[in-house]
Image (cartoon, rainbow, N blue to C red):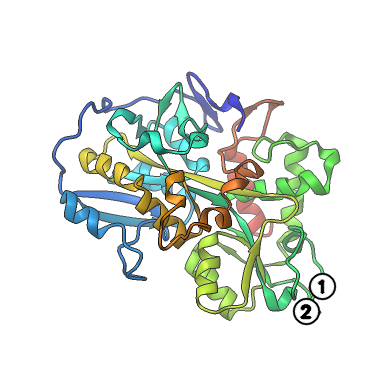
Amino acid sequence: MKTFLRMTTALTFAFGSVVPSFAADMKTEIGAGEGEVDIVAWAGYIERGDSDKAYDWVTGFEKETGCKVNVKTAATSDEMVTLMNQGGFDLVTASGDASLRLIAGGKVQPINTDLIKSWSTVDERLQNAAWHTVDGKHYGTPYQWGPNVLMYNTKAFGDKAPESWDVVFKEMTLPDGKSNKGRVQAYDGPIYIADAALYLKTANPDLGITDPYALNEDQYAAAIELLKGQRSLVGRYWHDATVQTDDFKNEGVVASGSWPYQVNLLEADGQPISSTIPKEGATGWADTTMMHVDAAHPNCAYMWMEHSLSPKVQGDVAAWFGSVPSVPAACKGNELLGDGGCATNGFDNFDKISFWRTPVSKCEQGTCVPYGRWVSDYIAVMGGQ
């Protein structure tokens, strides 16, 4: 990520320049637990064995700390931001397209890494990452990361994985002899504009796109035009992981950007599903456990952040979700993940992923299209306007 993201005094978004302000001082010690902790999380991120008894990193924590874990699942980063703005939650597993907004809006507080004993075990590539580090302060603990893969039906594509994202952006006849029209999906979130921009970076190099989250007017217009053309191909704009897996099983969907989580679920169910990262690369997510500025249960929250960084939890989450641990030690000795799991999930692909980031108006090339425009324009795209 570019160093200009480590802004020293403010973050500039569509709504202007905002200096983070905080109602709570940074904690200097962890006291007794308050009895519970309320977390907003992505689906599959916090499991207590309900889906599979082997995957449970909540029950032991609750017994050890006395902190009951309450989870609210969110389907998009925008939903996470809305929930944190409303309040009533202690923690959120925020991706990069939400974390900077939460920091700028003063909704999360800097954490005292001295209170996180496992901080030193976090991957050095993530410790000072731009999506949670502002003015030298850390606004959370790294959790998991990974790519937005191209998930596809192996019967539709035969023995060869699709080589390009063009299979979801351009109408074409697939190897099974049928058109892709109506059989592909796109993500129901404005950040998906970056996927179009990443594809165009290779498909139309004359646009000069270097960063899919920093687009000038011409680059942005080209991405929107591509997405408008894609509209006639899309059977559904997805945001619910469960609904997407059902669509691949029962509704004839054969290709879409997705998370490894859905791929794992479908493969475990014996479905003809696989995934790939096409030649253009992929967008991706690096998620941070962040604490609300008005967290009602800060001691339990700190305990959970420490717990979330244990190699056992990190490896189990990675095995369940298909993600990469933020703690490299989790890559060895985990029964569920296996010693080859980190390599399989993309540990060495860090530099190939364009991680989600909230687009801002001030960028390296001068002025870029801010996130507010992305939101309104993508809604119009999905509505066929």
Which image quarter holds the C terminus? bottom right
In this view of the protein, which residue sits in the foreground, 147 or 173? 147
For residue 176, the mark is 2
Whether residue 195 is visible, yes or no, is: yes
Q: Is residue 13 left or right of residue 58?
A: right
Indicate the position of residue 310 as horizontal and vertical percent values: 34, 47
In this view of the protein, which residue sits in the foreground, 198 or 48? 48
Indicate the position of residue 346 as horizontal and vertical percent values: 58, 52
Q: Is residue 33 left or right of residue 301?
A: left
For residue 310, the mark is none
Residue for point 23% across, 53% down: 61
In this view of the protein, which residue sits in the foreground, 376 or 210? 210
Whether residue 32 is situated above or below residue 264 in the rendered picture: above
For residue 173, the mark is 1
Residue for point 46% across, 44% down: 328
Q: Amino acid at mark 2?
A: Asp
Indicate the position of residue 259 as horizontal and vertical percent values: 55, 59
Q: Residue 62 appears in which quarter of the rendering?
A: bottom left
| Farthest residue, direction right | 206
Indicate the position of residue 19 as horizontal and vertical percent values: 44, 23
Q: Residue 94 appears in which quarter of the rendering?
A: top left
In this view of the protein, which residue sits in the foreground, 144 or 214? 144
Residue for point 30% across, 28% down: 114
Whether residue 26 is situated above or below residue 332 in the rendered picture: above
Which image quarter holds the N terminus? top right
Q: Compute the Cα span from label 2 to label 1.
A: 8 Å
Q: Amino acid at mark 1?
A: Thr
Whether residue 296 is visible, yes or no, is: no
Q: Is residue 206 left or right of residue 60?
A: right
Q: Residue 72 appears in which quarter of the rendering?
A: bottom left
